[in-house]
Image: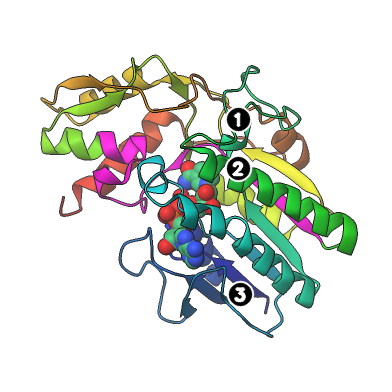
């Protein structure tokens, strides 16, 4: 039986990974301070430690250490910039030390945000990024960039098996359901289902690419458990780019909503375009997203309809 430590394991991605790991027969410890997740999303059989990842201490040995703890929603992290930076600096170091003590695989969820305002779209892993180092979003972007640098330093100096993934806008059932949390798909769905205004920050011409949770989980499990991947950095996303206004229209139509689509001032340093170059993931893992946006949105809208909004 494999022993896995997951920071942020009660969140959207973390709890999906935990459920998958349970199905694979793993023994799991989750450390999570419940700062951005709502309710308990993992079974009671999981050992749960309610603690900040920066301060969590253990002498236990693990086969895999997975570091996901972060405040990833723009509307939330700009209100908590110090916490945001600490979970992705002190927190990353702490999790790396635990992995070093166990001599085990360490996997990190970085972010497409490390690319900032990318000039190459779809963006490949070897694009260095164009990021404002001290703007409002820097607490998140630079935390992720520092973590990547620290992880590679541990890999080079201590030869531990580190794997970095850069997810691009993952969505699906299980994502935090209150629309105010700031992620665009749940925010639009909740507004549409409530008949409230669907708010676009900026002109709506900015683009994103979206990946359905099942596709994320499929490749993430491989990235975590397959051999000979130490030192790899992999984009996990979709190369299909969609404008945010178009996304709002699709969601409005799929929910048969009477909501208006309205515009507010653009967010500072909000990237104009984003899409993932996933050739590396395709080559190494023989992986491609299989769920189309329409299919994924359909499943997600159905899940939201079943909730008490
Ligand atoms: N979902 C996406 O589209 C996406 C895209 C890029 C990167 N990521 C990264 O993936 C990871 C997981 O994201 P998610 O979508 O599941 O977000 P989430 O908010 O649902 O989950 C994050 C979890 O981390 C916990 N947490 C936050 N700060 C903590 C701290 N200091 N100590 C302990 N626990 C803490 C939260 O309580 C929550 O349970 C994050 O690192 C995020 O930056 C996600």
Calculate the distance from the C-alpha at mark 3 to the C-alpha at mark 1.
38 Å
The structure residue drawn at horizontal position 61% and vertical position 80%, both measured from the top left corner, is: 57
Q: Is residue 232 visible?
A: yes
Residue 142: give its label. 2
Coordinates of residue 158 in the picture (x, y in percent): 87, 64
Coordinates of residue 205 in the picture (x, y in percent): 39, 14
Disc 3, disc 1: CB below 8 Å? no
Q: Residues within 10 Å of mark 3 (few under 14, many from 20)?
A: some
Coordinates of residue 67 in the picture (x, y in percent): 60, 61
Q: Is residue 171 magenta?
A: yes
Front one among 23 and 136? 136
Start-end of magenta stretch: 161-188
Residue labelled 1 has its Cβ within 8 Å of some atom of ligand 1: no
In the image: residue 37, left or right of residue 287: left
Q: Earlier in the sequence, mark 1 or mark 2?
A: 1
**In this picture, is 163 found above or below 45?**
above
**3 vs 1, front mark:** 1
Front one among 217 and 204? 204
The structure residue drawn at horizontal position 26% and vertical position 33%, both measured from the top left corner, is: 188
**In this picture, is 155 found above or below 276?**
below
Q: Secondary structure at mark 1?
A: loop
* Disc 3 target residue: 26
Q: Residues within 10 Å of mark 1 (few under 14, many from 20)?
A: many
Disc 1, disc 2: CB below 8 Å? yes
Q: Secondary structure at mark 2?
A: helix
Q: Earlier in the sequence, mark 2 or mark 3?
A: 3
Q: Is residue 24 visible?
A: no
* Disc 1 target residue: 131
Calculate the distance from the C-alpha at mark 2 to the C-alpha at mark 3.
33 Å
Q: Is residue 85 magenta?
A: no
Q: Secondary structure at mark 3?
A: loop
In the image: residue 294, left or right of residue 232: left
């Amino acid at each position: 039986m494999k022993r896995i430590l997951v920071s942020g394991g009660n969140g959207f991605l973390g709890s999906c990974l935990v459920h998958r790991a349970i199905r694979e027969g793993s023994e799991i410890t989750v450390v999570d301070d419940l700062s951005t997740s709502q309710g308990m999303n993992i079974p009671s059989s999981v050992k749960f430690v309610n603690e900040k990842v920066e301060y969590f201490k253990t002498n236990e040995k693990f086969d895999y250490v997975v570091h996901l703890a972060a405040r990833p929603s723009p509307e939330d992290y700009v209100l908590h910039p110090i916490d945001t930076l600490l979970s992705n600096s002190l927190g990353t170091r702490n999790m790396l030390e635990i992995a070093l003590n166990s001599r085990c695989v360490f996997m990190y969820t970085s972010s497409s945000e490390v690319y900032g305002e990318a000039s190459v779209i779809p963006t490949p892993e070897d694009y260095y990024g164009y990021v404002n180092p001290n703007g409002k979003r820097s607490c998140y972007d630079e935390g992720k960039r520092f973590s990547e640098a620290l992880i590679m330093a541990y890999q080079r100096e201590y030869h531990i098996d580190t794997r970095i993934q850069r997810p691009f806008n993952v969505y699906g059932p299980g994502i935090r359901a209150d629309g105010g949390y700031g992620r665009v798909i749940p925010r639009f769905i909740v507004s549409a289902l409530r008949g409230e205004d669907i708010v676009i920050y900026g002109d709506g011409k900015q683009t994103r690419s979206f990946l359905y949770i099942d596709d994320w989980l499929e490749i993430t499990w491989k990235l975590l458990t397959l051999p000979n991947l130490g030192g790899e950095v992999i984009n996990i996303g979709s190369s299909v780019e969609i404008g945010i206004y178009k996304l709002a229209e699709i969601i409005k139509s799929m929910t048969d909503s009477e909501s208006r689509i309205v515009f507010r001032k653009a967010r500072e340093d909000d990237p104009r375009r984003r899409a993932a170059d996933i050739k590396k993931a395709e080559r190494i893992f023989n992986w491609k997203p299989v769920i189309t946006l329409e299919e994924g949105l359909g499943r997600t809208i159905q899940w939201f309809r079943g909730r008490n909004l």
